[in-house]
Amino acid sequence: SRSINLAVIPGDGIGQEVVAQGLKVLNAVLPEDVKLETKEYDLGARRWHRTGETLPDAELEALKEHDAILLGAIGDPSVPSGVLERGLLLKLRFAFDHFVNLRPSKLFPNTATPLAGRPEIDFVVVREGTEGPYTGNGGSLRTGTPAEVATEVSVNTAYGVERVVRDAFARAQARPRKKLTLVHKNNVLVFAGHLWKNTFDKVAAEYPDVTTDYLHVDAATIFFVTQPERFDVIVTDNLFGDIITDLAAAVTGGIGLAASGNINPTGAFPSMFEPVHGSAPDIAGQGAADPTATILSVALLLRHLGYEAQAARIEEAVSADLAERDGTARTTDAIGDALAGRVAG
Ligand code: IPM
Ligand code: MN
């Protein structure tokens, strides 16, 4: 019989609350013959305060054995900026070679957005996940003096760019509109820009059915607001992808709905699914967080593991739930219950 061996990292702040709802919906949607095993990992701010550890090797090894990872959120104001981001979240993305950071954006019904009522918005950003300025390649000279110099080098390899560009073309090919937009800044970042554009054009020749387009990242931010329906699949580097997916979330219904998958398409390591939002310490512990982004991340997780019908059921449930939202505040738990009820049917 089938089984899912899931690692759960609730993490910090609202991470705990939203992950509980994600698991509730996962349990409700899975067919009875699928055995779900979960193991929770205590990683994040509390662990760091207690032991000074972010992600010990033993836990990294143990995580490798799972089919997938569900993560809530990482980060807390009591921990110096960068410690958990680099020592835990990015460490996982790099160690498990999550080179496809998949971030879909869809205009769901009835959502509070400046774009409500616009033609259908349904695009997906394929953000490179292991390179760019995220590699920690840089340094500081004369730190803390008036003569300080800081560098933060963006690393782009032919290998790393080609594999993510290929993934994006394959995704575009599989969608009805078959359109792929490369977002970069090759008028200024000429070296990396050349590698990306060259690779993009080379792979494009193998996908004659896919319509291609190129936008500088600054121009892309304009179109996200003025003409979002022009996008189908977007491929971009790690940092541009980070920034434009927050914008994409904001214009299509808010960060409370934005799901993501850190995917290793080769299956060599477990892929990791998480809401795009952070730990929101200001509202943590109040039952005020919207768990929908986490629940939609569970849908991405199921799709990745081959449970397409169950993934679609969750997405339909979210659509139906949003269509009926009337502005009355609901608790984290109440939203989780409502969605679990809908997918169980
Ligand atoms: C995200 C976050 C992370 C990123 C941070 C927390 C390291 O903003 O997942 O988008 O920059 O990738
Ligand atoms: Mn981000």
Image: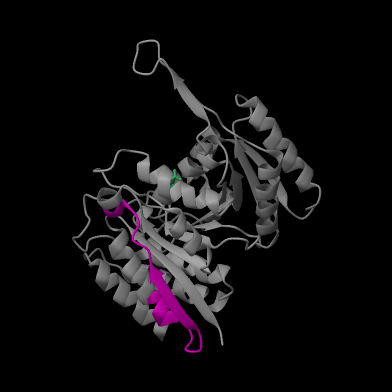
Q: Residue sitting at 44 percent across and 67 percent down?
A: 7
How many discs appear? 0
**Farthest residue toward the top?**
147
Q: Nearer the viewer, residue 47 or 187?
A: 47
User: Does 31 appear in magenta?
Assistant: yes
Where's the N terminus, which quadrant?
Answer: bottom right
State the extent of the magenta-drawn residues as a range: 25-47
Where's the C terminus, which quadrant?
Answer: bottom left
Residue 219 x %, y %:
54, 34
- Residue 25 to residue 261: above or below: below
Q: Nearer the viewer, residue 114 or 13?
A: 13
- Residue 261 to residue 201: above or below: below
- Residue 116 to residue 316: above or below: above
Q: Nearer the viewer, residue 103 or 10?
A: 10
Residue 57 x %, y %:
46, 54
Q: Residue sitting at 33 percent across and 70 percent down?
A: 21
Residue 186 x %, y %:
63, 29
User: Does 205 appear in magenta?
Assistant: no
Q: Residue sitting at 41 percent across and 45 percent down?
A: 87
Q: Nearer the viewer, residue 57 or 289?
A: 57
